[in-house]
Amino acid sequence: MKSAALLHTLEQQLATLCQQAAPLAQHTTVSARFDRHLFRTRSTKMQAYLDEAADNLAALRHAVATGRLQQVAWLAEHLTAQMAALTRESAVWPLRQWDNASPAVARWQRRRLQHQEFERRLLAMKQEREQRLSQVTTLAEQQRLHKEVEAYAGRLARCRRALENIENVLARLTR
C-alpha cells in the first residue's frame, strides 16, 4: 500500500514538473546542466532530462511490481533527486544569461535565450487567453479573446521562426 501511494505521488509530481517545464523542454544549452551521476543523458535539452525521469518512474513501477526492494529504494531516491534538480532548474532558467562560450557565439546565445524567454511568455499568455476563452459566455468577449489568441499564435510563430534562424546561425558558428 505504501508503494502505491509513493508511486501515485511521484507520478503526480512528475506530471506537474512536465507541465512547468513544457515551455523550456526543447531549449538547448551549450553544456549539460546536471551531474553525470544524476542523469545519464548527454543531451542538453530539458526534454531529454524529463524523459529520463519518466523512464526511471517506469522502472520504479516495474521494480515495485516484481518486489525488488533494494532497487525500489534506490530508484525512488534517485528519481526524487532528479525531480528536485529539474524543479530547481526550471525555476532558475529565466535567470541564466548564457552558458560559457566563445565571445563570437555569446551574442547569438544571448539572443537565443532572449527569444526562448519571449517564446515561454507568449505561450503562457496564449494559454491563459485560451483558458479564459473556454470560460466566457458572451459573444463579444469570445470574439475579442479569439482575436487575442490568434494574435498570440502569430507572434509565437514569428518568435519560433526567429529562434530557428538563430539556431541555424549558431549551428554554422559552432561547426
Image: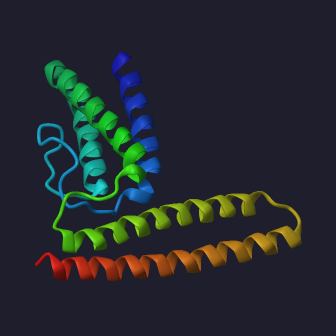
Instruction: Locate residue 154, reporting x and y percent.
Output: 57, 80
Residue toward you, 18 or 86 = 86
Q: Quadrant of the N terminus?
A: top left
Residue toward you, 99 or 5 = 99
Q: Is residue 80 above or below residue 92?
A: above
Residue toward you, 58 or 96 = 96
Q: Residue at x 18, y 83 (%)?
A: 172
Instruction: Locate residue 145, reporting x and y percent.
Output: 75, 69
Q: Quadrant of residue 23?
A: bottom left
Q: Residue at x 34, y 63 (%)?
A: 26
* Residue at the outermost top position: 2
Q: Is residue 132 above or below residue 158?
A: above
Number of marks present in the image shown: 0
Q: Quadrant of residue 85?
A: top left
Q: Residue at x 12, y 42 (%)?
A: 36
Q: Is residue 118 above or below residue 90?
A: below
| Scheme of image coloration | rainbow
Q: Residue at x 52, y 74 (%)?
A: 156
Instruction: Locate residue 81, reporting x and y percent.
Output: 27, 31
Instruction: Locate residue 78, reporting x and y percent.
Output: 22, 30
Residue toward you, 120 or 132 = 120
User: Is 5 displayed left or right of 98 in the figure?
Assistant: right
Q: Quadrant of the C terminus?
A: bottom left
Q: Quadrant of residue 117?
A: bottom left
